[in-house]
Amino acid sequence: MRERAVGGTSEGTGSAADSIRPTTTERHTPVPAAPSGRAEPTGKADPTGRAEPTERADPTGAGGEPRDFRAAFAAAHLAMALVDRDGSVVAVNDALASLLGTAPHSLLGQQAADLVDLAAEARTWQAYREVLRGRQARLRCTRRLKHPDGHSVWTEVTLGPVPGTHDVLLSVADVSDRRDLQARLRHLQMHDPVTRLPNRALFFERLSAALEASSYERGGTGRIGLCYLDLDGFKAVNDTLGHRVGDRLLTAVAARLTQCADQSGYGRTGGHLVARLGGDEFALLVEDSTGTEELVDLARAVLAAIQEPFELAGQRLSVSASIGVVERVAEGTSATGLMQAADTTLYWAKADGKARWTLFDPERNAHRMTRQALSSTLRPAVDRGEFALEYQPLVDLETGAVRGVEALVRWNHPQFGTLTPNRFIGIAEEDGSIVQLGQWVLRTACRQARRWQIEHPSDSPVFVSVNVAVRQVWDSDLVGDVAEILADTGLAPQLLQLELTESAVMGSAGRPLQALQALSDMGVRIAIDDFGTGYSNLAYLSRLPVSVLKLDGSFVRGFRYEGGTHPNPADETIVEALVQLAHRLGLTVTAECVETAGQAARLRRVGCDTGQGWLYSRAVAPERIAEMIRARTSSG
C-alpha cells in the first residue's frame, strides 16, 4: 500500500461538502460535551463507554452551523480520519478510503502512521508522536503513497488536535497534479530551451551534489573531472548566417557531445552530465573519474567529433573547439574552485592556438595567480614608494669613460621580493599603469642625473637613458610630461635619452611620429632599443628622428672567443654593416650585453661607439655611479 516518501512541506487544501452525504464509517468515539446553551446530543452507550453519534436536536444551532459536524466530515472532498492518542484510526471518510484504494471499514483500527508512512523518517516519526501526546500543535509533511492499482500518489499529510477531544485530525490532500506541474516547471527552469541540455543552474546543482557526496561516500573513486569547452568562431556563424543557423549548430553540437559522453562510459549517477553553460560554452562533468587519462580521452573524442563538418539547412559548416580539462580529488574541492581552474585552462587552450585541449597545470596557474597579484597591486605600489631605480653605465669603447647610464626600474615587492622589469612591465603595459609608472621613472631619473651634474660640475655631465613604452606615447602627453619634468629638475634636454623598442618605433605614424619629432626638436635623444630583432625596416630608419641605435645582445654574443675559434663570423659581419650604415645616417651605435674584453675590442675595431654590459658593471645604485664619475674625474 505504501512507498517510501520524499520529504517536503507545503500548505494543504480542502473543499466544502456538497449536497450528497456519503456514509461515515467510524469506531465508537466519545462525543464532547456541548457548549453552554446547546442541546446535549443523545445516543446509546456501548460496553466500552463510547457513544453512537446522532443528529443534534436543534437542526441549525445557535450559530447557524450544520446540525451534525460529522456530516461535513463525511461529505468533505478532503481525505480525513480521526486518530486517537494511541495512533489508531477511529473514523474515516470516503475520500480517504478512495485515495488509499480500499474500503472505509478496513481502515478502522489501523495505525495512522502505517497508512501514510510516517515512520519512514525519524524526525517525522518523532513529531507525529509529539502531536499525539499533545506536545506539538501540528505536523505537515509530503508523502508519496502507492495506490493498489500501481500508480503513485503524492500527498500532503497534516495532523492537528481536535479541540475539546483527545483525538487528532488526519487530513491527506492529493497534490500529484501540483507536483507534476512543479516538476515540469523545474525542468523548464533547469534546461536550456535551444539544446534541451541541462543549463548552468542544474550543472552547478549536480556539481555541488557530486562534491558533497564524494566527501562522505567511500564506494567510488573519490575523484571528479571536468571538460569545459568553447566553440571557436561561433560568433562568425551568428553574424554571417544568422541566429537561427547558430541555434541549429548549437543543437547539433549538443547531440555530438551527448553521444561522446554516452560512449565514454557510465558513472555512479548513470552517465556523464553534459550541460550548456551559456552562449557557445558547454561542460561535461565526470563523476568518480578514474584519473587524468579518462578526461584526456574524453576531450580527444569531443574534439574529433566537433571537428567533423555539420550539414545544416543545406550548408556545410566546419567549427572547432577549445577545451580546458581539469581532473582532481573531489575532497577539498569546491565548485567555484573547479570552475575557476577549468575556465583558466580553457583560456590557455585559446591562447595556445585554439582547436585543442589543454590540461590544467598547477605551476602555470601559480604563475598566473602571481601575475594577477602583481597586476592588482601595481598601481598603488607607485604611491607606496615600492619602486626604485638602478643604473647601468654606458661606456665609451675608445676611452673607457662613462658617457651615460640607463635607468632600470626595480620593484621591491613586500611579498615576492625584488622584481626585475621583465616580471611586471608587460603587466603594466596591459593594464595602462605603465603611464603612471613611466612618469615616476622619468622624473626620478632626470632628478638623479641633475644631482650628479651638480655634484661633479667640473666633469662632462652624463646623460640618462629611460625606456619608454609605446602606450605612454598613445595614452599620455609624453611631450608635455618630458617638458615639465625637464623644467622642474633643471636637466638639459641633451642629457635625456628615451629608448623605444624597434617594434614600437618602426611603422610609427600619426601621433607617435609627431611626438617623437617634437621630442627630437626639443633636443631629447631618441634611441631604438634591441635593434635587429624586430622589423629592421631601413626605410623607416631614414625618416624617423632617431639619434642612437642599440644593437641587441644576440649579435654581440657572437663576438665571444672560445678556445681561439670565433663561434659565428656572420654576427661580426652584420654588426660591422649596421655600424657603418648608422654612421652614414649620422647615428651613434651602442652595443648591449658586452661581457668580455675580447668582445669590447672587436666592437671597438668595427667602429661601435659605446658599450653596455657586465664587463663594465651590472645595474647599481646611484651612489656607485657617483663613484664611477669621481674615478673618471680623478683619472682625467
Image: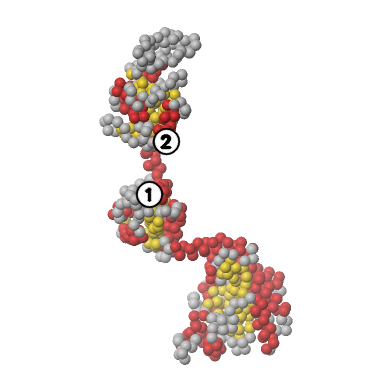
Residue 481 rendering spot, x and y as whole percentages: 65, 68
Relative height, residue 136 to residue 27 (above, below): below
Mark 2: secondary structure: helix
Q: Residue furthest left?
A: 149
Q: Residue at x 45, y 9 (%)?
A: 39
Q: Residue at x 37, y 63 (%)?
A: 356
Q: Amino acid at mark 1?
A: Glu
Relative height, residue 179 to residue 534 (above, below): above
Residue 628 rendering spot, x and y as whole percentages: 65, 82
* Near-viewer residue (495 or 516): 495
Would you name the residue on which mark 2 appears? Answer: 123
Q: CA distance from mark 2 to mark 1?
A: 23 Å
Mark 1: secondary structure: loop
Residue 249 rendering spot, x and y as whole percentages: 35, 53
Would you name the residue on which mark 1 appears? Answer: 217
Q: Which quarter of the figure is the C terminus placed in?
A: bottom right
Q: In this view of the protein, can residue 251 be seen by the observer? A: no
Q: Amino acid at mark 2?
A: Arg
Horizontal arrangement in the rendering, residue 24 relative to residue 580 (left or right): left
